[in-house]
Image (cartoon, grey):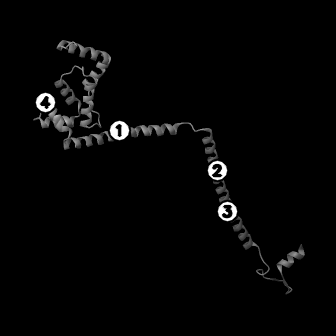
């Protein structure tokens, strides 16, 4: 059995990495690491675990540990950067690698970190809701402006026709009531103008006879 020297192990490791991690995969993961950014509603713990997972996926990423800490610090949101600075005498980047890793580990379980996580989540939910509202309004406007179907048009026409007939019936009833009132007034007026036998006095002639005007008119006729 051939003993592996330092050079042989390095070559074997390099060959293994080149076989299972080609250049395109390596470059894609390196890009994820170098452009790391904490998501709006992502907690500090979740972002740290995601950042570390990129490194495990591609061990030959080529970044030094100090560079990785710097990339993580720049990628997290401002409240968490301020927290790390406050825990390291206002300048997190002056800490050694071991000190920086310890500060990050402590921050993951800190009570203030949990408060920041809750604030981040609420802010992200409010931002999402404010963006969704105009979309719903636009969707409702588009649906309202769409041409109605044939069935809808027929129903609308029938509704308009029924409304017109209802108005016509109402106008007819009002006109009928008005005319009946006028006719009743006219009948009452005519009744007051027509003389009756009880209300007309007899006419006395020179001869002394009395003549009923109504009977006189009937005889003349």
User: Which label's residue is closer to the chain start, 2 or 1?
Assistant: 1
Residue reaching furthest to the left: 89
Q: Is residue 108 left or right of residue 138?
A: left
- Figure quadrant of residue 70: top left
- Label 3 near label 1: C-beta < 8 Å? no
Q: Quadrant of the C terminus?
A: bottom right
From the image, state whether disc 3 or disc 2 is nearer to you.
Answer: 2
- Label 1 near label 2: C-beta < 8 Å? no
Position of 71 relative to 166 (above/below):
above
What residue lies at 14% left-to-right and 31% top-to-bottom?
Answer: 100
From the image, state whether disc 4 or disc 2 is nearer to you.
Answer: 4
Residue ID for mark 2: 162
Residue nearest the viewer, comparing 164 with 25: 25
User: Which label's residue is closer to the chain start, 3 or 4?
Assistant: 4
Residue ID for mark 1: 128
From the image, state whether disc 3 or disc 4 is nearer to you.
Answer: 4
**Alpha carbon separation for disc pair 2 and 1:** 46 Å
**Alpha carbon separation for disc pair 4 and 1:** 38 Å
**Alpha carbon separation for disc pair 3 and 2:** 23 Å
Query: Dot 3: within a 10 Å radius of its alpha carbon, few (fewer than 14), some, or many (20 or more) residues?
Result: few
Residue ID for mark 3: 177
From the image, state whether disc 2 or disc 1 is nearer to you.
Answer: 1
- Provide the secondary structure element on which disc 3 rests: helix
Q: Residue 30 at what x, y percent from top left?
A: 27, 21
Residue ID for mark 4: 98
User: Which label's residue is closer to the chain start, 4 or 2?
Assistant: 4
- Figure quadrant of residue 71: top left
What residue lies at 69% left-to-right and 62% top-to-bottom?
Answer: 179
Position of 83 relative to 160 (above/below):
above
Position of 21 relative to 200 (above/below):
above
- Provide the secondary structure element on which disc 4 rests: helix
């Amino acid at each position: 059995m051939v003993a592996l020297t330092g050079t042989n192990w390095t070559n074997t490791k390099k060959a293994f990495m080149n076989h299972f991690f080609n250049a395109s995969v390596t470059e894609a993961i390196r890009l994820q690491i170098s452009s790391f950014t904490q998501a709006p509603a992502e907690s500090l713990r979740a972002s740290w675990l995601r950042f570390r997972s990129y490194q495990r996926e591609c061990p030959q990423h080529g970044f030094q540990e100090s560079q990785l800490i710097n990339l993580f610090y720049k990628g997290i949101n401002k409240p968490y950067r301020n927290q790390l600075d406050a825990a390291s005498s206002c300048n997190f980047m002056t800490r050694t690698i071991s000190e920086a890793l310890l500060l990050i580990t402590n921050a993951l379980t800190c009570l203030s970190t949990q408060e920041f996580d809750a604030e981040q989540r609420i802010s992200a939910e409010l931002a999402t809701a404010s963006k969704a509202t105009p979309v719903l309004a636009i969707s409702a406007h588009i649906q309202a402006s769409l041409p109605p179907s044939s069935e809808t048009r027929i129903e609308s026409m029938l509704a308009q026709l029924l409304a017109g007939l209802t108005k016509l019936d109402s106008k007819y009833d009002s006109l009928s009531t008005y005319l009946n009132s006028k006719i009743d007034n006219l009948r009452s007026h005519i009744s007051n103008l027509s003389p009756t036998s009880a209300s007309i006095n007899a006419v006395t002639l020179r001869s002394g006879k009395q003549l009923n005007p109504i009977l006189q008119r009937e005889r003349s006729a």
